[in-house]
Image (tube, rainbow, N blue to C red):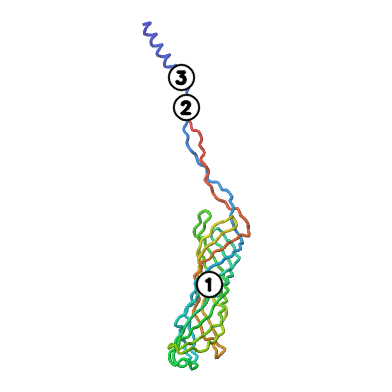
Amino acid sequence: MRKIFLAGTAMVLAGVGSASAADIYPAQVIDAPIYEAPVSQPVAAASGWYLRGDAGYAWNRSSGVNFLQGGLGTWAPFTTATLRSSYSIGGGVGYQINQKLRTDVTLDYFSKADFRGSTTGGGALAGVCAGPCTSTDLSSVSGLSLLANAYVDIYKQGRFTLYGGAGLGGTKVKWGDLANTACADDGTGCAATDIHGGAKGWRFTYALMAGASVDLSCNLKADVGYRYRHITGGAMFKSLTSNGYQGYNKSLASHEVRGGLRYSLGGCAQEEVYIEPAPIMPAVYK
């Protein structure tokens, strides 16, 4: 009996010792990330009033060019009519309404674009044309466009922005004197060159724009874009025999590639941008 008692006592004491040794080791730690709510941080961005300057190159077209046949009193189209390319330069002032929308007023000058046309007809002309004649007509056109424009930023990624816009206004068109020379188609001779005075005046104009800008700094942007400009038609040159006009066109259109700069006068405003913070890793005991 005494041996059995001693053996049981030894087993009990061994279990108590094992339990005490287990209590000495620390508990396991499991890291569980906890995310805080996003916080706002001010960053620099341009806003308010801005100035702009642009230069460009335009491919031009004059459509519906007609002239009044003096002897017949009827209108006839030019057989050929081409308008060469020209340069443009301008500036303006605008306002950045919000992050997506801005407006500006621009004044652009487009340089002289050479016009070359021809007409054909028959009958005697100053004793030169006994038969069919071809008349060569040379002139040029320039103008000053005043437009009110609005733009929408379509897409923005980092420093780059894509935009689209439209404008309405007027253009003061100035046609140069037209030199008209008629020559016999059979090569027998040419008449003296007649000079018709050029026409000028304001014409309704609209424009469509698209382009991209890049932030050079918080208040300076570089801009590259395309503009389609449509100018309504009107008189081109005067008549030799009356105070009226003898030549007209239906419209002037140009496809322009432009580059420029926009400078914000408001400095660098502070906009609130939400930033996702780094996760906090509290200790969780198990």
Mark toward the viewer: 3 or 1: 1
Q: Is residue 226 left or right of residue 107?
A: left
Q: CA distance from mark 2 to mark 3?
A: 13 Å
**Which three-letter amino acid code belongs to the residue tagged 1?**
Ser
Residue 47's disc is none
Q: Residues within 10 Å of mark 1 (few under 14, many from 20)?
A: some
In the rendered view, would you say 202 is above or below 6?
A: below
- Depth order, front residue of 37/55: 55
Q: CA distance from mark 2 to mark 1?
A: 83 Å
Q: Residues within 10 Å of mark 2 (few under 14, many from 20)?
A: few
Q: CA distance from mark 3 to mark 1?
A: 95 Å
Quadrant housing the N terminus: top left
**Which three-letter amino acid code belongs to the residue tagged 2?**
Ala
Residue 86's disc is 1
Q: Position of residue 129 (x, y in %)?
A: 46, 91
In the rendered view, would you say 263 is above or below 171?
A: above
Q: How many marks?
A: 3
- Judged from the image, the secondary structure of the residue bearing numbered disc 2 is loop
Residue 27's disc is 2
Q: Which residue is mark 3?
A: 21
